[in-house]
Amino acid sequence: MSSIAAPHADAHVESHGEADTLMGWLTTVDHKRIGKLYLYTSLTFFVLGGIEALFIRVQLMMPNMHFVSAQTYNELFTMHATTMVFLAIMPMSAAFFNYVIPLQIGARDVVFPRLNAFSYWVYLFGGLFINSSFFFNAFPDGGWFGYANLTSGKYSPGFSISFWAIGLLILGVSSMAAGVNFITTILNMRAPGMTMFRVPVFTWMSLVVQFLVVLSFPMVTVGLILLVFDRNYGTNFYVPETGGDPLLWQHLFWLFGHPEVYILILPAMGLVSEILPTFARKPLFGAPFVIFSGILIGFIGFGVWSHHMFTVGLGPVADSAFASSTMLISIPTAVKIFNWLATMWGGKIRFTTANLYAISFVAMFTLGGLSGVMHASPPIDLQHQDSYFVVAHFHYVLVGGSILGLFAGMYFYWPKMFGYCLDETLGKIGWAVMLFGFNLTFFPMHFLGVQGMPRRYYTYDAGVGLELWNLVATIGAFTLATGILIALINFITSGRRATQRAGADPWDAATLEWSIASPPDHYNFAKLPRVHSDRPLWDEKHEGGPAVSQAKIAGPGPHHVPMPPPSYWPIIAAGFLIMIFTGFLLGKGHYDAGTGSVVFDHAAFIRQVVVTGIGALGFFATVLKWFGEDDSHR
Amino acid sequence: MNRASRLVSVLPLLALAVLAGCSFWPAETNPYTTIHPSTDFGEVTQHMYSMVAYWVLVIAIRVFSLLAFVLIRFRDDGSPGNPKQVHGNPQLEFAWTMLPVAIVIAITIPTIRAIFQIGDAAPQGSVEVRVVGRRWWWAFEYKDGSNVVTANELHLPVGKPVSLQLDSDTVIHSFWVPRLGGKRDAVPGRTNRIWFTIKDKVEAGAAPLEYLGECAEYCGDEHARMRMRVYAHDPADFTQWQTDMTTPATFADPEVQAKGEKRFTELGCGGCHTVVGNSGANGKTGPSLTRFGQRHSVGAGAAPFEHDDRTPFSEQEKIDVLTKWLHNPDDIKLGTTEWSNPGRAIDGMNIPRETSHFGTQDAPSDADYLTDEEIHDLVAYLLAMK
């Protein structure tokens, strides 16, 4: 991606940015570069997951199609979901956490810049690890939810589930490390005067997300480790024949899986809460309400997991409790929608591409939320569970919600990240095609669900009323893909076509990230601003408030801004971490039909000990070097 | 705004019309429909669905109208100056927090009532059937003293409570016949229950009512073709059907029976399949084939005995598809035999009869398949058992 040359740093500031070489990028600890790496990588995986989705839609275009085999289809829907959730949407959000949070809170970087780089490399390697299974003819096929006991050594004897389970463990390390990093950053690195009540809403929502990550990933980690133990050493956590319980997996998975839904949607809500006010030229209506709603969603999100399990027979008392808590969570969600509407009420709404995406987010997320209320009611869910109605619902939340919100964020923050605005004409065409294609794909799925079509069916019969809407959905999927393609072309070519620099504040926005150059200098803020309100830049520009813009802060600037030096230890540590986990992959036991259980495989165990051992030694040696890095010249 | 608000107020009526649009998808052409229930259980779920769908449509229409109004009314008209900087209004925000609270309460109370209604114990004297999810077919064992065992086609009486005990001896499946009410998972190691009474009417002696069902929990390769059919009889006819299922079928042509029974035993079919009346066929691993001639598909719906428009096959077409199935079932349903998926289809069909390759990756050779003559005899035997 090309970009216009960075402006000259203030004459009196000395700080050497990182070199724009391959080595410079591999050793970067700059949150802005890491944010861009997250962005590029997540967009690549997003395209991969999208192609998998198109294969699925071609297969379902007509009844009894044989475009792909049952086995391939099962691999496709498993990896489509796994890719979109863990490798596309979460890291696309992470791109914004990385790039925007330090700028919004007036910091020069995150608290642990090397840990931040480590998170990225672990994410990249973890994504490659899962997908490399394709070349070993072991593409995961157990569903992104990997329900036990289909994942047991008996029913999935190959390496596919091992790749999946261990890949998710690796990605969990990345997310947890990033979560700790951002919690610490947001709590400790805020500019002087920025109380928690003055923290911008995007950063607030991100903070909630990081707590959700840090509290929910351990649960799926435990679940996955038990699964790997079952598959490697013949333990009996999930195997019913020997007294294990497959429902244990469902509880552990959804204890993580439901907060995960909010991990995916809250960043988009945060972005929209920045964009709508900016383009309505008003503050966010009832910002504290929006923030407390986000916190409340985070809390209640831990108490609703069994609504994914209404059909497993937990009994009426449990079903009633989880139905009630699920209904409850719709209240703070509804509050947010009302607040966004009220933000625009009485404003002067500019229909930029970013705002069009943000407005569509509100509309589409409303539909997704409302269909969610329907199967929050267990009697209804007994019909909707695992049908296309649910598929429609969560795509309205994840595509109509998360993806539209993140695309809004991309159009909004692109000038800050790259110094030029994306093409508005192409942007609006892409938005219109995308929104139309999205609804054409997923709205008919409500009908398919009501007509009784279950999910994860690689084929369906003719003559049972499913032909029309499946065909429409497939046409919609290709329309949606075209819209996304137009947006991607816009991302790639706008830089070449841009004729002017964006300037520090292209949207006339309100918060600190717009008070510094676009793209910001290596050190972000030459002098840390003093914050007096929740909209410091707006107040400076329109209300005669105190100066926060870098050019206007009085007094002599510093002569040297201390910044952490580049480091190659994070990427090396990430490499050794992958080796530790690869050992677990190699340690898979084999299923013995005679005894009916997984047999402890000595050769595999020795392979595992050797590979994991070398990886662990290398990892700790690397971490020691990393700890020993001398920053005294900062 | 006045005209707009009037428009908004008639929209709930439109929403009702959309709900009534259920008639767009009648059960005749949409046999898996969730909105035309035939049981008391289904009526409970359908009632909740209509009520919540109504609320959802009303809210959606109001939010969308409000959004459209805001976008048109408050678009940037290019006039100078900033709009009034309103930071919030606690009273207003409290009010619109209470609105969803009220709606949520209005939905939650009937929800909980419905949950307990569904979760009640089945009445005494229900017809008890154990439903077992296999890979990838359904076994039905009647626990009402009749000892009937059948597969993939469940026969029930109308007007009498039916209680299903769901479990699995493989992975998790989910029993879903949309028109009989909601689904329930069949989880290995535990027993789930649903019960219902079929409310539809059928005359004594008339053809039974048909409901289509499917597996709704992902269970591996052929999850998509783990279908079932439910037939609802007049109670007297149901009793007659149970009697038929426990007594040997009578063959019009004794030669078909003799040859078929011989092949069945010789080729080892009886090791896995049960046929009442055939002393060499007592296996439990595979689906019971008693009175297979009455069935409507082979391979749990993988190859229905009907055309795409659901008109039934002729006798010759049935013979053709069953012949194809017996030659190599994997052509119709991948993963049926252990050949198509070594190591995975543990309870797979053993059609290539040379078992020397069992558990190996070697592809079957021509010599491993049944001969045309063997297949002919078996097909004639199976279809004659009505």
Image (tube, coloured by chain):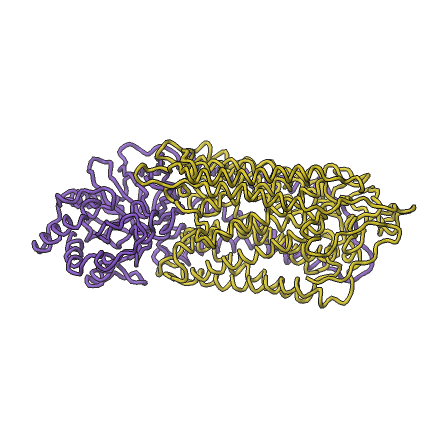
Quadrant housing residue A410 = bottom right
Please state if A354 lies on the left or on the right of A46 as rendered.
right
Residue A272 visible in rendering: no
The x, y position of residue A503, in whole percent, is 80, 58
Q: Nearer the viewer, residue A568 or A273?
A: A568
Place of residue B4 in the rendered image (x, y in percent of width and height, measured from the top left): 63, 57
Q: Is residue B161 above or below residue B84?
A: above
Residue that appears at 30% across and 41% down: B131
Residue lying farthest right?
A555
Q: Residue at x 56, y 44 (%)?
A: A578
Q: Which chain comes out yellow in the rendered image?
A: A
Q: Is residue B332 visible?
A: yes
Q: In what quadrant of the picture does the C terminus of chain A appear? A: top right
Q: Give the x, y percent position of residue A43.
A: 60, 56
Left or right: residue A203 compared with residue B194: right
Counting from the top left corner in percent of width and height, residue A501 is at 78, 62
- Chain B rendering hue: purple
